[in-house]
Amino acid sequence: MKLLFLEPFAGISGDMLLGALIDLGVPVEEMEKQVVALGLGDRVELKVSWVDRRGIAASKVDVVVDGKLGIPDKPAHEGEDPVTVEEVLGRLDTSSLEPEVREKAGGIFRRLSEAEARVHGSAPGRVHLHETGAIDAVVDVVCGVAAVSSLGVDTVLSTPPCEGHGEVETAHGILPVPAPATAFLLEGVPLRRVDVPFELVTPTGAAMLVSLVDTFTYDISLTPERIGYGAGTRELDSRPNVLRATFGSTAGRFTVSPDQVVVLETTVDDTLPEIWPYLVERLLEAGARDAYMTPVVMKKGRPGVNLTVLGDRADIAELERIVFEETGTLGIRVTAADRLVLARARGMLQTALGPLSVKLSRVAGDSEWRVHPEYEVCRDTALASGMPLRDVYAEVTRASAVEGALRVEKRIEEEEGNTP
């Protein structure tokens, strides 16, 4: 299993990630192809240099737009019209980028737009950058996505990013570090605050980090094959301003993938019982991995319900909104949880009742897939055949032991529901 492991101990920005990936061995020419695919070959130049950051040799990438150095996270100048996310997405849609790169890059800019919208209390759609900075950000994001894709890794891991302290000048005045958009982007991400009086994580860096990384963890075991360093612009007194990236692999046959979910929890005692199944249905439709209730005894001996919702970072805001709307709770606990996920697939099982769709999983070292019947499939089969539901489940169990009855159709990355 091939891994990309990032260590943003001095924060992260788009150019730091590009530099680290180039230092890992991704050819600069591969990134220049993306610039051409964006239709910016005549306006943008990638300048790569090797610099020293407190004794660490690192690759430094500068995006030069129309002869000027782009600054992707600089606010729009007064009097300029801010570039909208629709304009950025339109450029991506009309490009000749690979579909996978175009889709992933588009998702990153949607995250940026949603974070900005929350800062301003407006509808998503505006990316507050001057034109040169917007082009720089597009190049950073697209080249970064394409470079990670070219490495052919199975998963991307990262240690919790480090952020500095102090204040940052914004269009809204002086605000604490991290900047507002960055803070929203890092919701649900474990964050380390370090004694550096500067902003270390930029909005573009944060959006790329949360979109590309599968799990934030210190618990990592891999065999390093290549290591690269990408340099930031500022010199820091206490640490080299670099991002370290390691390309490596796990040893042997590895069928458990690291993953991370966000856990939302709230405990209530004043919600009608009829609300709960409706609430769970809404949460699952909104993208929750799973949602379930646990009976508890609350203060003063009152019976209550502890609601647990598992979801992705990108869905936190919508899931929170639904819980607040339907339960009337006054607060929700939010934590990030690491998990290990088995290799999974979908399959078709030939049974005496006809072919039935099943889910499959496999433990490391096993040569056979484990068969998991799906409730909805078994229920519909029971209703159509007139058989008791338990007999349908029994037939699935019997057929799964028959050699040649199972056909694996495709691997799946995410399992709906029943999430550990």
Image (cartoon, helix red, strand yellow):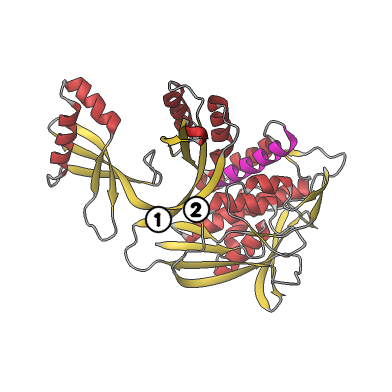
- Whether residue 69 appears in this view of the structure is yes
Q: Could you tell me which quadrant the N terminus lies in?
A: bottom left
- Whether residue 126 appears in this view of the structure is no
**261 or 74: nearer the eye?**
261
**Contact check, label 2 and label 1, Cβ < 8 Å:** yes
**In the figure, 227 relative to 33: above or below?**
below
| Snapshot quadrant of residue 252 | bottom left
**3 or 342: nearer the eye?**
342
- Disc 1: which residue: 257
- Part of the protein shown in magenta: 103-121
Q: Position of residue 58 (x, y in %)?
A: 65, 72
- The kind of secondary structure the magenta stretch mainly shows is helix
Q: Three-letter amino acid code at disc 2? A: Asp
- Disc 2: which residue: 214
Q: Secondary structure at mark 2?
A: loop
**Horizontal arrangement in the rendering, residue 365 relative to residue 340 (left or right):** left
**161 or 299: nearer the eye?**
299
Q: Secondary structure at mark 1?
A: strand
